[in-house]
Image (cartoon, helix red, strand yellow):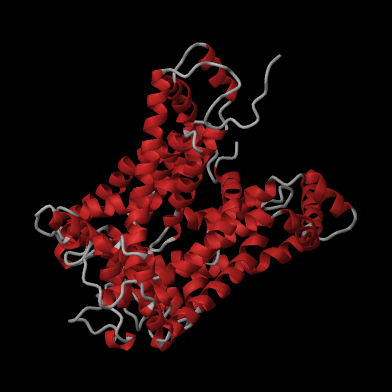
Amino acid sequence: MVQKSGTKQLMREIKRHRSVYVLLAVPFVYYIIFKYIPIFNGQIAFKDYMALDGVLGSSWIGFEHFRTFINSYYFVELLRNTLMYSFGKLVFSLPLAIILAIAIYESNRPHLRKIVQTLAYLPHFLSWVIMYGILLALLAPGDGILNDIIKMFGGKPIDFLTNTDAFPWIVILSDAWKEMGWSAIIFIAALMGIDPSLFEAALVEGANSWQRVRYITLPSIRPVILIVVLLRLGTILDAGFNQIFMLYSTPVLSVADIIDTWVYRQGLLEFQFGLATAVGLFKGVIGMFLILGSNRLVKRFGGNPLF
Amino acid sequence: MEQKIKKPKGRFTSVAVRPTAADHSFNLVVDIFLMGLLVIIAVPLWSTITLSFRPNDYIGNNLQGMFLAPWQWSNAAYKALLGNAGFVLAFGNSVKILIGGVVTALLLTIPLAYVLSIHTLPGRRYLNLLIIIPYVFNVGMIPSYLLVTNLGLIDKLAAVFLPGAISTYNCLIMRSFFEGIPNELKESARIDGATEIQVLMLVILPLSKAIIMTIGLFYGVSFWNDFFHAMLYLNNNQLQPLPILLRNILMASGMNEYVEVNAFGDAPIAAIKAASVFMSAIPMVIAYPFIQKYFTKGTLLGSVKG
């Protein structure tokens, strides 16, 4: 009896919301096609994919591709480079973003603050193709500004983009240059939320500006910093495909190649669809655990994860 | 009497305390940091801009070129670009992708975000799961490539924006915004007999200008800047958008035949490169100040709510 009325009520609820399902129809179909068919296609990681046979028609070969990848000499290199860039960017640009946010918040000069803020957000909207153009004007061995300066002091010009020592720094620093301002937004917002009476109390107690930052500002935004770090750790295997793809070249391949660029070359240039998909899936599964884990931690620390 | 501070920014003047030497040194460090940063951000941008206006007969290096007086600048590179049929075509393709992409993306994302924000909807949990699974579990680029190929989207401009037409992240930000709209407004419309479509159109959308502008900007940036999908799916030269052409121009040198360098007249090739960089960035640079006031408001609602 209860069961029946429950079903009835559900039917009534569904009927009441019928116009919602109309709104939902197209996005729903979109999701099935563009988000779920690729997951379905992921099965070719376990298959000897032949274009003629298609995804379903190709024959199963089990974990063959995964074994090939893990036993190959580039496995360690790809993983090392990927983690090097992810952690490098995190360690370098996150403190910079926090310092920038505090400086913008603390500055007594409204004009300077405004100009820095506006200009610092801007590079986030430039693509890596555009960034490549800007970096060329800066770093080119023949006529880049940086090499003009080196030559001015009598040094030898360096081809930064094909030098294996310089390349990782170029990647990390150019990412910091591009994203620092944008990453600072969330910290600026957190700073705006600090209760001003805390600062007044500190002033009355005789704290100077340094002590104010040390004992009030930083502790106040610590939860936000923690959450940002956790969320970044969740995507630690994404080292920035577009950036590396645009900047790298054969001479620096050993320090530049990350999982994603390798998947691209192997899959779409060499047509090793099965192997490339297996590596993508390998990354996807680890990435999934990392995101779920970091999301759970964010929740535990009182943050508000997206899902 | 307690004095109230309206804006807790920078100085805290409500309590009269004489600034100490430490305070002065702090302010100095902050200002030096900001000014240093300003230079670091501005120099690469400025060097590209000045390079694009470089006259053909200029003999100094790029460092000196940054200090060239504006009345000595030459617009030869821009003239050459705008007079080049290939560049105009690529710019047009990019505009088509931008408009088609943003319209499609918003038409798909807004209804989905709204439906996800309705708490009474039966099956809402499963719907959430449906959205989250592909977001968390990313199978990589090859399976998507197979899909787009099988759909017959090769050499269609839509191939550039369809795969990214719903960004789960954008959708979830929009959902949290919609959830923040007071329920009474929606309920009163529903009691008056409005359908959900009417509630969305007449109640929600008029209140959501900020978030729609913000998310629209995010989508616009991603489609305008897209290089990867265009490279994969557009083989026809007539369809190539600006980022593809820009990369070919940037890679062009004496040995490289990607682009007919001579097609750009007698402007210096370095200036042509810099000018195409600037032209590619300009729509974003123009749109950005108009939307800047919206995006801080809009994104923050999504990211640091609660």
Q: Residue at image x 42%, y 19%? A: A211
Q: Nearer the viewer, residue B91 or A248?
A: B91
Q: Position of residue B284 (x, y in %)?
A: 49, 64
Q: Nearer the viewer, residue B230 or A143?
A: A143
Q: Residue at image x 17%, y 67%? A: A142
Q: Residue at image x 26%, y 75%? A: B251
- On the rendered image, what quadrant is the N terminus of chain B found in? top right
Q: Position of residue B74 (x, y in %)?
A: 36, 75
B141 vs A158, left or right, is right
Instruction: Give the vertical position of B113 relative to A55 (above or below).
Output: above
Instruction: Give the vertical position of B97 relative to B112 (above or below).
Output: below
User: Within the image, what quadrant is residue B4 found in?
Assistant: top right
- On the rendered image, what quadrant is the C terminus of chain B found in? top right
B85 vs B179, left or right, is left
A147 vs B259, left or right, is left
Q: Position of residue A289 (x, y in %)?
A: 40, 46
Residue farthest top in this picture: A205
User: Within the image, what quadrant is residue A24 found in?
Assistant: bottom right
